[in-house]
Image (cartoon, rainbow, N blue to C red):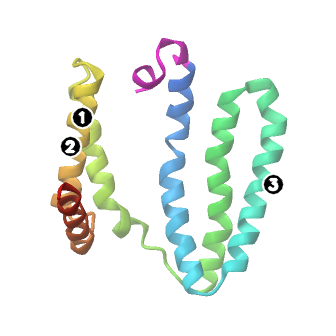
Amino acid sequence: FVWLIGGESFLPHGATALAILIWFLPLSYVNAITQYVLIALDQQKWIAIAFAIATAFNLVTNIIFVPQYGYAAAAVTTVLSELVLLAPFFVIARRWEVVIPVFSASWRPVLAGVGMFAVAWLTGGLPALPSMALAGFVYLGLVIVLGALPRQDLARFWSALRSAQD
């Protein structure tokens, strides 16, 4: 993917950075769900405090490690900052006796992602663009079949698509 977008000059370092940063996504997903729960509980002040802690961690670790380890340290710091953000979120949620439904909220998109990865891996011998397109279509199909998106959201999407064609 890095080669397709940026060309040879971004390899291998761009791919290495993305391989580290990909771990940011599931943590960010859990943090987003947890933030919505905290907002529903009128606990926005704790969100601000958690972000202040995570930002301080991010700044300090970047100042310490980026000069010696470069972009890899920045990428790892980004991922670890999400973990630092997650810790106070979970502490506050547990104080309110709230259990965040991480598994029930994420198994469908995760399974769709596994299917997409499998197709991308199996079609790795093809040129990048057809392989990525096929993997993307498989992901979209699995998201629909598994019910990862609520039916009303899908209905809105198809309605918007139809009205855009008019």
Secondary element at tag 1: helix
Alpha-carbon span between mark 3 and mark 2: 40 Å
- Dot 3 corresponds to which residue? 56
| Rendered position, 51 above or below 13 | below
Choose between 90 and 78: the one closer to the eye.
78
* The image quarter in which residue 134 lies: top left
Residue 3 covered by magenta stretch: yes
Left or right placement of residue 92 versus residue 30 in this view: right
Q: Amino acid at mark 1?
A: Ala
Percent from the top left, x then y, of residue 89? 63, 70
| Rendered position, 35 above or below 10 | below
Q: Amino acid at mark 2?
A: Phe
Residue at (64, 83) in percent of width and height: 95
Quadrant for the N terminus in the image: top left
Which residue ends up furthest to the front in the rendered image?
Answer: 166
Alpha-carbon span between mark 2 and mark 1: 6 Å
Q: Disc 2, disc 1: CB below 8 Å?
A: yes
- Dot 2 corresponds to which residue? 137
**Mark 1 or mark 3, earlier in chain:** 3
Q: Disc 3, disc 2: CB below 8 Å?
A: no
- Dot 1 corresponds to which residue? 133
Left or right placement of residue 55 versus residue 41 in this view: right
Alpha-carbon span between mark 1 and mark 3: 40 Å
* The image quarter in which residue 2 lies: top left
Q: Which residues are magenta?
A: 1-12
Residue at (49, 69) in percent of width and height: 33
Residue at (22, 19) in percent of width and height: 126
Percent from the top left, x then y, of residue 80? 65, 48
